[in-house]
Image (spheres, grey):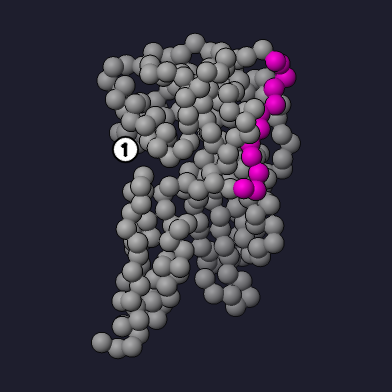
Amino acid sequence: MSEDEEQESCFELPALQTNQSESASDVVVNDELGVGQSHEVKRVLSKFTDVLTDVPGKTDVLKCDIKLTTDKPIKAKPYPVPLSMRDSLQEEVRKMIDMGVIEPSNSPYSSPVVLVPKPDGTKRFCVDYRKLNKVTTYEAEPMQTMTEIFSELSNDKYFSRIDLTKGYWQVEMTQSAKEKTAFVTPDGLWQFKTMPFGLVGAPAVFTRLMRTILRDVPNVVNYLDDILFIPRHGMSM
């Protein structure tokens, strides 16, 4: 075994943690890479195992607040959940509890839940916040359009892409906003501890978060939780 091959085999990636189904050990390293390149990739994976996970972390940069144009609690009638889907709904709720995303609620607010079919046959858990969104004060945070992003990349040949795991769930709600996210299931009333999908202000909050974090990082563009790093002027990937 050569010295490079010996070094390549010395990195050990940790076992899965609680609630984690994917980790750095699931990353597939292209077998067309040279020994030295493969070694460098595995070194980076080993160094950043804490962020290479499908369990969302929590940012301390900002929190999501919800400002309404009325003090009257918004309550929408729950949608009926077919018996055939209740097990799937209960499983989604259990997962979110285990990840610290939701908690039991006694809120006067309530939005309905809907399970949306996905291409792979599973169901996507969604909360219908349309009534709440109608009375939510919209944040005027500027967002790049896809056209602007593609224009910025028009002269580049290569880029690295990072997709944040459950990006919205990495943003905590303010204490006063939690009750406004409440939703009802056949098993009770719950509220989000972290920012849910479907809130009209969520894209603006997340855009502001990413703008703050990436402000001083060169050659990076992003659209919500998709981050592109573009190697330029002799930079390596």
Does the magenta run of residues contain 64?
A: yes
Above or below residue 187? Residue 50 is: below
Residue ID at (39%, 29%): 93
Height in image: 90 above or below 233?
Answer: above
Q: Residue 50, percent across and down?
A: 45, 58
Viewer-side residue, 149 vs 29: 29
Secondary structure mainly formed by the magenta segment: loop
* Residue that badge 1 annotates: 120
From this viewpoint, which residue is outermost toward the bottom?
A: 2
Q: Is residue 217 above or below residue 144?
A: below
Q: Position of residue 210 (x, y in %)?
A: 63, 50
Image coordinates for residue 232, horizontal then vertical, percent:
61, 71
- Does residue 124 appear in the picture of this structure? no
Judging depth in this view, the residue of 184 and 220 nearest the camera is 184
Q: Quadrant of residue 96?
A: top left
At x 39% / y 71%, what residue is drawn? 42
Mark 1 is on which residue type?
Asp
Helix, strand or loop at label 1? It is loop
Task: Write the residue at 33% across / 54% down.
Answer: 16
**Segment tinted magenta in the rendering:** 60-71
Residue 133, given in percent of the width and then of the height, sits at: 62, 23
Please tell me whether residue 58 is drawn above or below residue 216 in the rendered image.
Answer: above
Q: Quadrant of the N terminus?
A: bottom left
* Residue occupying the point 72% across, 43% down: 142
